[in-house]
Image: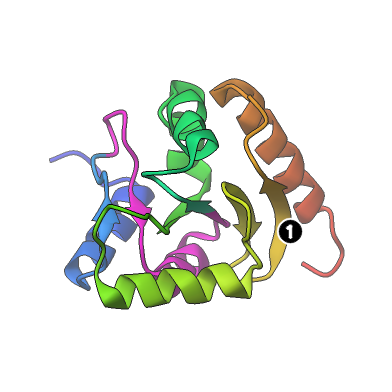
C-alpha cells in the first residue's frame, strides 16, 4: 500500500468526523472544499497550512462562476492548493438548496469577514486571522492567481508576529 500523503490523512480524518467535503478526490480536477470553518481551522493547525475561504453565490454570481472555471478548476491552482491550502467553500445561493444549518453557518462566516460583494477570497491562519483578501474576480488565470497567493504567503511568513 502506498504511503498516505498528509493531505489525504487530514481529509480522511475530516471525513470520519462527518465534516462535509465537496470534491474529495485529490487526484482529480476537483479539490476537497470543506463547508465547516471549525473543521478547517483544525485541519489548518494540524497541517500548518493557511485556509483559503471562497465566498460565492454559486448559482447567481457570474464572476463567481468564472472564478471557479478559470482558476479553481485549473491545474496550477489544483496542484498548489493540494500542497499548501485548506479550502473552505462558503456558498450563499439563491436557488440551490442548502440545509438551514449550513445557510446559518455561511451567513455568520460571511458576516464575520464582511463579505458583501461576491466572490470574496480570503487567506486566514488557523486562528481565523485574515492576511489576504480579494474582493471580486479580476480575470486571473489559475497560474496568475497562484502567483498572487504565493506572494501573500511569503509576505505573511515574513511578518514578525507569526
Q: Is 101 left or right of 80, judged from the image as shown?
A: left
Q: SS class of the residue under badge 1? A: strand
Badge 1: residue crowd in 10 Å (few <14, some 14–19, many ≥20): some
Q: Is residue 42 visible?
A: no
Q: Is residue 19 magenta?
A: no
In the image, 69 versus 21, the foreground residue is: 69
Residue 135: x and y, percent? Answer: 68, 47
Q: Would you name the residue on which mark 1 appears?
A: 131
Q: Magenta span has 33? A: yes
Going 25% across and 43% down the picture, which residue do you hit? 3
In the rendered image, the vertical position of residue 103 relative to residue 7, given as above or below? below
**What percent of the width, then of the height, locates residue 88?**
44, 57
The residue positioned farthest toward the left in the image shown: 1
- Name which quarter of the figure residue 13 lies in: bottom left
Instruction: Tell me which residue sits at (33%, 48%) in the image.
Output: 32
Q: What range of the chain is rendered magenta?
A: 26-53
- Where in the figure is residue 15, as x and y percent of width and height? 21, 63
Q: How many marks?
A: 1
Q: Is 124 rendered above or below residue 72?
A: below
- Percent across and percent down for residue 97 are 24, 59
Q: Quadrant of the N terminus?
A: top left
Write the residue at 26% across / 68% down.
19
Q: Considering only vertical position in the picture, is 67 above or below 35?
A: above
Q: Is residue 62 visible?
A: yes
Q: Quadrant of residue 9?
A: bottom left
Front residue of 54/80: it is 54
Amino acid at each position: 500500500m502506498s504511503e498516505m500523503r498528509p493531505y489525504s490523512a487530514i481529509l480522511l480524518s475530516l471525513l470520519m468526523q462527518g465534516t462535509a467535503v465537496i470534491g474529495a478526490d485529490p487526484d482529480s480536477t476537483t479539490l476537497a472544499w470543506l463547508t465547516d470553518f471549525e473543521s478547517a481551522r483544525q485541519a489548518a493547525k494540524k497541517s500548518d497550512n493557511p485556509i483559503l475561504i471562497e465566498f460565492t453565490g454559486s448559482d447567481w454570481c457570474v464572476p463567481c462562476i468564472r472564478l471557479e472555471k478559470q482558476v479553481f478548476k485549473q491545474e496550477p491552482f489544483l496542484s498548489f492548493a493540494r500542497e499548501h491550502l485548506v479550502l473552505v467553500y462558503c456558498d450563499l445561493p439563491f436557488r440551490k438548496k442548502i440545509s438551514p444549518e449550513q445557510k446559518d453557518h455561511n451567513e455568520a462566516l460571511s458576516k464575520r469577514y464582511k463579505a458583501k460583494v461576491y466572490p470574496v477570497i480570503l487567506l486566514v491562519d488557523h486562528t481565523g486571522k485574515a492576511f489576504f483578501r480579494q474582493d471580486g474576480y479580476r480575470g486571473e488565470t489559475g497560474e496568475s492567481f497562484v502567483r498572487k497567493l504565493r506572494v501573500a504567503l511569503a509576505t505573511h511568513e515574513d511578518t514578525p508576529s507569526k
